[in-house]
Amino acid sequence: MTAMTDVAFLLLTFFILTTQFKPDEPVMVDTPSSVSEEKLMESNMMQVLVDVKGRVFFNCDGPSYRKDLLEKLGQKYKINFSEDEKEMFSNLQTIGMPMTKLKEYLSWSNSERTEYDKNSPGIPIDSTNNQLADWIWFARLSNPEYQAVIKGDRETNYPVVKRVFDIFQEKKVNKFNFVTSLEKRPNV
Amino acid sequence: MAAELGGDGGGKHKGGKPKGKKQSTRIDFTPMVDLGFLLITFFMLTTTMSKPQTMEVNLPSKEKVKRDDQTKVAESSAITVILGEFGKVYYYVGNTPAVADSIKVSSFAASGGIRDVLLAKQAPWISKIKAAKAKLPNNPSAAQMEALRKEVSGIKGEKLATTMLIKATDNSKFKNLVDIVDELNICEIGKYAIVDLNDQEKAMLTAKNLK
């Protein structure tokens, strides 16, 4: 009995220490499967998430880079973010809304944010109001090491994905990583 | 099997001092173990042991390249694959379709689809790559693996090896793009580019009523 208890608690400790909760994402995305066995990098990634309706969300890691990014975006869009708002932003993950909504979004509670995300229009990507380009540009200024990751849904229409490629390429990013789930490699 | 640290159960003892019942010092651990297992189950189920996979894709730079610097793709080694609606695939050999009828319709089916076409086209290089891999000893060192990787990418990059042009129509889905890049990996094709459809191809697709 004692031995079993010991083993059980050892396992428990192991799981507690190794577990990583699934990152918080405002929308469910069903990634396409591929035979690629390469793992997604652990850090230095900026991820653009495109959901099935074609809405675009943005995420990048590193709280200090995120603060820097918000500051730069604030300067460009003439929005003053307080220290608290920066702190809040640095702790969030994937977000997507027009710039005008960001300040209000940061003042909300978690449940209000979840509610907003359900019907969020995402980050504007049309050529007249290309805010995604600014997100990418300022993120790269904050941390030049960022690598572009695109997480798209299987059923996302190609033109939206193409638009995201184009925006990345405008900002001189030509190398992408697509997030995929593993599929067995066929024998050929 | 509750904890047995309590007193004597509150029995009445009229007169005289209470009978000194022998106290048990044993604590029952069963609930704790239960809780332990419950937590283990919880963590086992919520943990994401495997990180998501990734597929690396390079797009041709948009910056204008001087005409002379552009690498000309040999007509015979090129294959153009067009992604259509509902996972349909259209392809033709070369980088400009001569006539509308040279565009053939295919699919992502495991056999009889685009994979067979690509495998057939890339066959000589696939056998070269297989031969290179066969030379590797059972327990290869890191250096040997690196050498193999270099050799394989050298073979894939040979001048006459297949070059694939991927063109997606507006009716295709993200999944189709990932699938076709997957086929590249399966068929060991190293040279590819994701580009836009040109007007000639658009006209031919319309003429053939392909979307």
Image (cartoon, coloured by chain):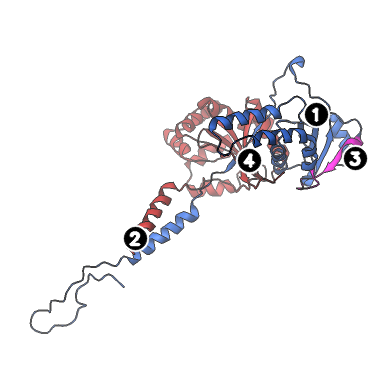
Chain colours: A red, B blue
Say which mark, if any, is on residue B208. Answer: 3
The answer to whether A77 appears left or right of B27 in the picture is right
Q: Three-letter amino acid code at disc 1?
A: Ser
**Same chain, marks 4 and 3?**
no
Sequence-wise, which precedes: disc 3 or disc 1?
Answer: 1
Residue B178 location, quadrant: top right
Residue at 70% x, 31% y: name it. Answer: B190
Q: Nearer the viewer, mark 1 or mark 4?
A: 1
The magenta region covers: B100-113
Q: Position of residue A51 (x, y in %)?
A: 64, 44
The answer to whether A147 appears left or right of B193 in the picture is left
Q: Three-letter amino acid code at disc 4?
A: Ser
> Pointer 1: residues within 10 angstroms few (<14), some, or many (20+)?
some
The chain identifier of the residue carrying mark 3 reads B
Q: Three-letter amino acid code at disc 2?
A: Ala
Q: Is residue A48 above or below residue A137?
A: below
Q: Three-letter amino acid code at disc 3?
A: Lys
User: Considering depth in this image, is B102 or B145 the residue closer to the camera?
Assistant: B145
Question: The residue tagged with tag 1: helix, strand or loop?
Answer: loop
Residues at circles 3 and 1 in contact by the CB criterion of under 8 Å:
no
Say which mark, if any, is on residue A124. Answer: none
Question: The residue tagged with tag 3: helix, strand or loop?
Answer: loop
Q: Position of residue B28 (x, y in %)?
A: 29, 67
Residue B105 forms part of the magenta stretch = yes
Separation (CA) of disc 2 from disc 3 = 73 Å
Q: Is residue B69 above or below residue A181?
A: above
Separation (CA) of disc 4 from disc 3 = 35 Å
The chain identifier of the residue carrying mark 4 reads A
Question: The residue tagged with tag 4: helix, strand or loop?
Answer: loop
* Residue named by callout 2: A3
**Is residue B153 among the parts visible in the rendering?**
yes
Q: Nearer the viewer, mark 3 or mark 1?
A: 1
